[in-house]
Image (cartoon, rainbow, N blue to C red):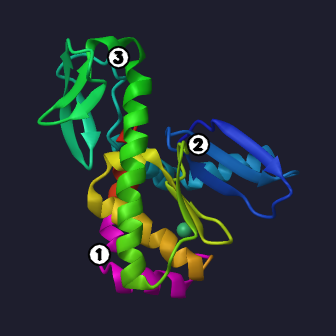
Amino acid sequence: METIKIDKIVRSNRKTVALIVTQDAALVVRAPVYTPMKYIERLVSKKSSWIKQKIAEVLKRPRPLAKEFVGGEGFLYLGKLHKLHIVDDASLIIELRDRLYISKNSLPQARKVIVQWYKEEALKIIRERCAWYAKITGYTPASVKITNAQKRWGSCGPKGTLNFSWRLIMAPMEVIDYLVVHELVHIEQPDHSKLFWTKVQSILPDYKKREKWLKQNGGLLTV
Ligand SMILES: [Zn+2]
């Protein structure tokens, strides 16, 4: 038998024990209030190969490097890396040409300037994609907004108001389209029922591939 470190035990009103491997490869146990420690330890030991496999999967995912905002550093836009190019030009703030041009004056607030640019681009492109898929699907959103959400890529409010994280603009267009279709279908199907997924698949037959990309690479969509 092998001992695996439990990082956190959360006791609550629930009825069953659940083992969760988090995004940062920690093992969290959720258990009913009076579950004996011995029981939890035995379960973790019994499931050790499954836990180890999950941890290995999480650790294999690509991780973002901390941004330094120096010339030549790569920034993602629609799934492609663009090198940052610093120019001594006060008339320019930020602009994507062959490279991502940023003025020397913008450097002290480089992160803010780049995030603002990402937000504007995300709004423009995601609104266009929503309009395009609204025509195809017949589901028209009441509004389309951009959020700062870290982990939630998109959401659909009860009145058909759609929200998308600006981070999505770093993902390839196929992935953005998947999120757009996903939220548009929620206008009619609020839950993730079988019918919901059937509708998503009828619009994007390869949606699973796109969803998988986001699961595996979503952690890279950050500045
Ligand atoms: Zn959903």
Badge 3 crowding class, 10 Å Cα cut-off, few under 14, some 14 to 19, many 20 or more, is some
* Disc 2 residue type (three-letter): Leu
Residue named by callout 2? 27
Q: CA distance from mark 2 to mark 3?
A: 42 Å
User: Under 8 Å from ligand 1: the CB of mark 3?
Assistant: no
Q: Residue at x 39, y 11 (%)?
A: 108
Res. 9 mark: none
Number of numbered discs overlaid on the protein picture:
3
Disc 3 target residue: 106
Residue 171 appears left or right of 41: left
Q: Quadrant of residue 63?
A: top left
Horizontal and vertical percent for residue 61? 35, 44
For the view shown, which residue lies furthest in the front direction? 91
User: What residue is drawn where x is 33% and y is 78%?
Assistant: 204
The answer to which quarter of the image holds residue 89 is top left
Q: CA distance from mark 1 to mark 3?
A: 41 Å
Lower position in the chain sequence, tag 1 or tag 2: 2
Q: Which residues are magenta?
A: 191-210
Q: Quadrant of ligand 1?
A: bottom right
Disc on the earlier residue, 2 or 3: 2
